[in-house]
Image (cartoon, grey):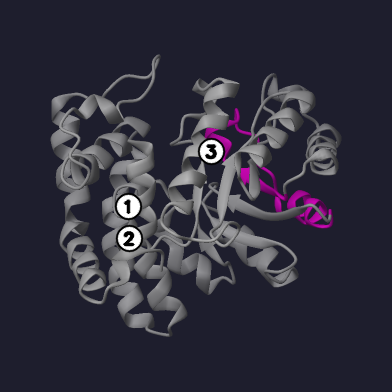
Amino acid sequence: MQYAHCQHLVRAGQHGLVYLGTNGELALLDRAERKQIVATARRAVADLGIPDGEYPLVAGISAQGTKETVQLAHDAHDAGAGWALLLPPSYWAKAVTEEALLGYYRDVADASPLPVVVYNFPGVTSGIDLDSDQLAALAAHPNIVAVKLTCGNVGKAVRLASTFSPAQFGVYGGSSDYLVPTLEAGGVGCVTGLANVFPAATARVFDLWTEGKRDEAQRLQAVVANAEWACKKSLAATKYGAWWFVGRTRLGLRDRMTFAPRKPYLEIGEPLRQWTVQTMGVLEEDEAAILEGAEKNGKADGAS
């Protein structure tokens, strides 16, 4: 399933893939599973005829201790990832002082064979939220190269993007419902769970904006933002949407449990399933039209 889904995302126009993040349920996977997922993604990309190293593949390496995190960075590198995505440690959050927080990232970056992308998501780290000054301090490290801001703080994106060029420190939004505001703020893109459901439409927002078609980008951004509202309800809703709109229709996976969350998390109930399909469904027409256009142009045979 992962192999086929990965190839669908690439063919649909995604400019890079991130595995072992929040929607990837990193915290529920063991070390061997993490390596296998990254290796499968790298193989799926290679089998599309894309030369090694030409397609960005990012792997989450988050753990609570420095030693384990470094081990996971080496695992991700060996499995074929090109970058490492890293949440702050959050067990006993009161003990994570600024000195401990910055030291953790610097120690990992010193030992990591992969460039490190800071992952700032207070919702999954007991409220730990790296501020602009802390992120700027980390950006000075030669092996800390970017940040994913799932805090939703566009002001933070503006401050960082006005201080660092993308080559120095890339600023990414943490979801696609504010992709255009992130780009307008000087950011370079986003990492979004909705792309698992509508990869062509989310990528198209970025493409339209970079092509200077701002009105078209704004129109599609509005539809994307309304569809992504379902993702805000629960991880299980995102997974159900991915099964309904991709797994069921495009990958031939009739059993919705192939996209179900791992325990202890639970599937969403029937009322929320119906609401998820209705809410995400506003983007279905745009997604189909973009994919159809790509197929007619012969672009669906490989990465765009």
Separation (CA) of disc 3 from disc 2? 21 Å
Which one is in front in this view, the residue at disc 3 or the one at disc 1? 3
**Image: 261 above or below 294:** above
Tag 1 residue: 8
Quarter of the image for the C terminus: give it.
bottom left
Label 3, secondary structure: give it.
helix
User: Dots 2 and 1: beta carbons under 8 Å?
Assistant: yes
Separation (CA) of disc 3 from disc 1? 17 Å
Give the residue at x 23% y 65%: 291
Label 1, secondary structure: give it.
helix
On the rendered structure, is 81 left or right of 182?
A: right
Foreground residue among 44 and 212: 44
Bounds of the magenta segment: 115-141
Foreground residue among 188 and 82: 82
User: Label 1: few (<14), some or many (≥20) within 10 Å?
Assistant: many
User: Label 3: few (<14), some or many (≥20) within 10 Å?
Assistant: some
Q: Position of residue 154 (x, y in %)?
A: 55, 60
User: Dots 3 and 1: beta carbons under 8 Å?
Assistant: no
Q: Position of residue 25 (x, y in %)?
A: 47, 29
Q: Position of residue 284 (x, y in %)?
A: 18, 57
Foreground residue among 281 and 4: 4
- Mark 1: amino acid: His
Tag 3 residue: 39
Which mark identifies residue 239? none
- Magenta region includes residue 120: yes
Q: Is residue 281 visible?
A: yes
- Mark 3: amino acid: Ala
**Image: 293 above or below 174:** below
Give the residue at x 79% y 37%: 108
Tag 2 residue: 12
Quarter of the image for the N terminus: give it.
top left
